[in-house]
Amino acid sequence: MNWRYIYIASVVGLSYVLFISWNAEKEIKQEVAEATAISLNNNERILPAGETKDFIEIENSKLIVKISPITGKIWEARLKEHTYLNNDDSLGVRLFGFDNTTGFKFYLNSGFASEGQEFEVVSIQPTSVELASIDGNINKNISLKADDYELSIKDVWSGDLPVDLPTPYIAMYRTDGRALDARDNFFENSSYTGVAFNTPDEPYANTRLRSIDERIEYFQRGGWVAFIQKYFMAAILTPSDRVQALIALPPSSDSDTYVMGAMSREVKASDLVSGIDHRVFLGPKVRSDLMGRASDLELTIDMGWFWFLAQPLMMLLSMINAFVGNWGISILLLTVLVKLLLWPISAKGFSSMAKMRTAQPKLKEIQERYKDDRAKLGTEMMALYKKEGINPAGGCFPLFLQMPVFIAFFFCLRESVELRHESFFFWIKDLSAPDPLFILPVLFAALMYLTQQLNPQPPGMDPTQAQIMKFMPVMIAVIFVIMPAGLVLYSVANSAISLVQQRAMYKKYGASVYTSDGSGGGG
């Protein structure tokens, strides 16, 4: 009996149990947080500082919006179709909201740049509310479009106009910190969170919130300013019929709140009397939807360095899913399609590795014969490469050519809200969350190990380096434990197809499948 193997198996088994327990504990914490949120949501008297009356609530099929009847501020915007937890009883994700225990707040306000106004309710409808200021100068109408993620606000100056016309504005106010309903996982917390502008000179100018230490301002017609986070965003879409100053302001000396918004310039008295219209998007970052709302709004989806590859890949993935109706199967089918398109490139790499494999006995003989003469060793090896038609870098170069596609697919799957809470089969209930049982990372490690056994060990590889390479499958599997299941599913499928192709090429060139000593290496 080999006690070493029993010890290793025991350690691996215990680690697996601990990982499962850790994952279950995280889910329990999320459920507790959700239960607390439901309790707070049902208590109508919990209000942010400065508010004294219960909120007015309007809703459509997409959004629930809560408005202060006193200040006209929009204190909460909750998505109906995108829940915090992956169950039907969970509350929807909040884009606007507040937490009195931590001091976090994120809300929207609009009106005229003058002294603060107090309002009273004129009328309430299921999808709209009308407010009027107590002094009679301002009317405000807030409404939701039917079956849409857009909020419309109309501010009208209904009193006597002053000599100096007031400046219309709309702005979002947010303290620093994690989004209210962000899930507790590495990829969601590490994704970009900050302010983005659309300008004529720069379609997508973005800044992290805490990096705003001075006033940012753009003067233009049209464009937008948005606060973006993982999967969702709130965006002010400005019209093209008047000049706007798009701004972002750091907290003042007596405040911890950042300001992001738009101020209308060059307005006329007739504009104020007829009303200033504002559009606000509050919803998920779905590329096909954003493209139809405003120019370049789809750029708020972070597709990484190879966005020009990631965007068509996402479009193709969506087209496939429209037919099969399962995002996991769609990922598998797209992986197969991509591998077929890259088949000639990868075949060249595998053929070069197969030739290297068949030449291993001769290489070892040369290494043994000239181990004390480095110059002669190099000369003889190059002569053998030339004779056998081997390109030493031929196995790695095609992999580098495929790397942009892999990175593009990585960002495509990482940033796609379409995968959020979408199940595959069996134990995978959410493709945007890590595999709860860690089965996919283990499968990937096994495939990587088998691939290593096929790869010829580079001549002259340091023994220590060779030993490290043997542990690479375990190291990668540990990294994949925190990755979204959709990404790992793609990696498993990609590795499985590559393994089949590589074995086929080895058989074609008569290369042995495994080395006699079981050693493997990179290539």
Image (spheres, rainbow, N blue to C red):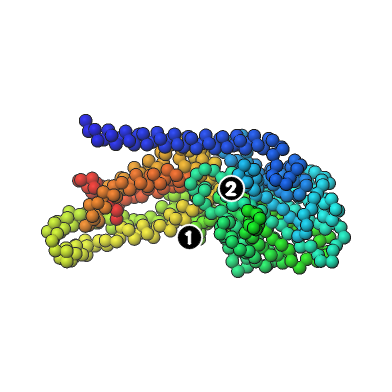
Left or right: 435 in relation to 347: right
Q: Earlier in the sequence, mark 2 or mark 1?
A: 2
For label 1, the crowd category at 10 Å Cα-Cα, with few meaning under 14, some 14 to 19 and many 20 or more, is: few
Q: Which residue is mark 1?
A: 305
Asked if residue 16 can be seen in this view, the reply is yes
The picture quadrant where one finds residue 252 is: bottom right
Instruction: Classify the position of the N terminus by image quarter.
Output: top left
- Residue 433, compared with residue 412, is above or below; it is above
The percent position of residue 392, horizontal first and vertical second, equals 26, 61
Q: How many marks?
A: 2
Q: Residue at x 34, y 60 (%)?
A: 397
- Residue 350, compared with residue 39, is above or below; it is below
Which mark, residue 179? 2
Query: Is residue 259 or residue 523 the one in the foreground?
Result: 259
Query: Is residue 522 or residue 55 the one in the foreground?
Result: 55
Left or right: 389 in relation to 261: left
Left or right: 167 in relation to 18: right
The percent position of residue 124, horizontal first and vertical second, equals 80, 43
Label 2: element kind = loop
Q: Amino acid at mark 2?
A: Ala
Q: Residue at x 83, y 65 (%)?
A: 269
- Residue 64, compared with residue 395, is above or below; it is above
Asked if residue 312 can be seen in this view, the reply is no
The percent position of residue 218, horizontal first and vertical second, equals 65, 66
For label 2, the crowd category at 10 Å Cα-Cα, with few meaning under 14, some 14 to 19 and many 20 or more, is: many
Q: Are marks 2 and 1 in contact (CB under 8 Å)?
A: no
Q: Residue at x 22, y 62 (%)?
A: 385
